Image: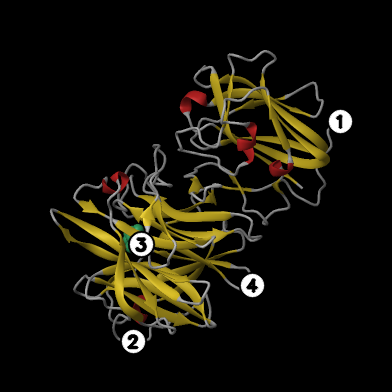
Amino acid sequence: MKEKPESAAPAPAYYQNPLIKNVADPSVIRAPDGTYYAYPTGGTRFVAYSSRDLAHWTAEGVVLSGAEVKWAVNKFWAPEVVEHAGKYYMFFSAAAADGIPKISVAISDSPKGPFKHPSEKPVFDFGFGTIDPFVFKDDDGRMYLYFTKELFQVDSHKESQIFVAELSSDLLSVKGEPKQLTRPEQAWEIQSGNMRWNEGSYVLKRNGMYYLMYSANCYCGKRYGVGYATSKQAMGPFVKYEKNPILQATYDQVSGTGHHTIASSPDGKELFILYHSHIDPLKGGGDRQMNMDRIGFRPDGTLYVNGPTITKQPMPSGTTGWSNIAGEATFTASSSKAGFPPDNLKDGMYAVTVKDGSGEWITDLAAKAKGAWVKLAWSKPQTISDILLYNSAEDRRKVGTGQLYVDDDQTPIEVTFPKEPGAAAIVTVARKNVKSVKLMLSRTQAESAEAGLSEIIVLGK
Ligand code: FUB
């Protein structure tokens, strides 16, 4: 008889996008007590949302009212909160009656506000329209303000560009002139015609490399997406990743994925990108919602996003009793195409829209003698709840059906792979003392000879 997992850990929960409706441009911080706070655009004031797990959010009410910002009348956009010297600084942009947005700052003792605006005019005025502030604190304590110079005429088109300036220690002024860092120039960034954008910056530092992430194209359209550029210095020069974008909608159910932030899972083991997309993917426009997907680094240091997803995904690591134990298993397979070994199924990348087969296990169903299979074996018995089988991102290699064998079971669990983009086949095993699982592939969705999978996640403990 099959044993059930111990009752101490309930069956794993999943999250599914979208997470918050009617918000855009999310920024997220984690307070010292472990609570996450999200601050998005959404009207003529700013509301904070709180969460313990990044997936479930509760509205905390208005933390900065429009009335508090006496000089501004509209364009209350893109709040970005940073903790500094025991206080919380909310950077944002807004516009006075002239309609030209400017960046300003409001200050609070708590991430839950209320934030107070310190002056009768915008704190920053560079002499041109500015939006989308982002503050990066470097290892040496220096603080930098990244922002967007609003659309302006360049030759026969209009474009926005990303700038940076070093902040003074009170965060209320900058040192020296801002420096221009990026402009829309890659082919994917000029899909909105004669209006071109680089905006919504976010900076990550890893192994001494600065990753300047940003969004391009009109926020109102389907092709709004995220790319990045790298530099060895916070103030550049930055070089754009040649395979940008790393997040963009390429299928019907999603549109306008961009203006993001990055957050770590509660246990610090996983990184997530939180971004907005259109509520109605056919209509686009300004009605947006917040989503979240996993993000990671390849061994060569390049960034990837496991998204955009619209189906159930495992909760962030450290939020349930279950974690992915696939990494501790040895993977073997019936056969593998050169360069696409079964170890790719535990590399963290479960591509949704990447179309070059990178990071996948690829096998040949036509050449199978005793069937095409992949097997995971552990050196010690495991308690396993669910197994998530992520299909190939390549339509012609997508698996249609298979059978999953647990240990030496004679009767397999029949598996049918879902058709939604990026969806995993979620197989409930609910067993203790498991030493191996083996997936036999029956057929591909396109009845093609070559089959592929991009990732296998095993939720165990
Ligand atoms: O939400 C208002 C504006 O749309 C933001 O400032 C831009 O980044 C774009 O998302």
Marker disc for residue 33: 4
CB of mark 1 within 8 Å of CB of mark 4? no
Above or below, comparing residue 335 to residue 324 in the picture: above
Question: For the residues marked 4 and 2, what is the alpha-carbon distance in whole angstroms?
Answer: 31 Å
Side (left or right) of 378 relative to 393: right
The x and y percentages for residue 309 are 50, 43
Nearest to N terminus: mark 2 or mark 3:
2
Q: Which three-letter amino acid code belongs to the residue tagged 2?
A: Ser
Side (left or right) of 131 relative to 100: right
Q: Nearer the viewer, mark 1 or mark 2?
A: 2
CB of mark 4 within 8 Å of CB of mark 2? no
Q: Which residue is mark 3?
A: 237
The x and y percentages for residue 193 are 21, 47
Dot 2 surroundings within 10 Å: few (below 14), some, or many (20 or more)? some
Q: Which three-letter amino acid code belongs to the residue tagged 4?
A: Asp
Question: For the residues marked 3 and 4, what is the alpha-carbon distance in whole angstroms?
Answer: 37 Å
Marker disc for residue 119: 2
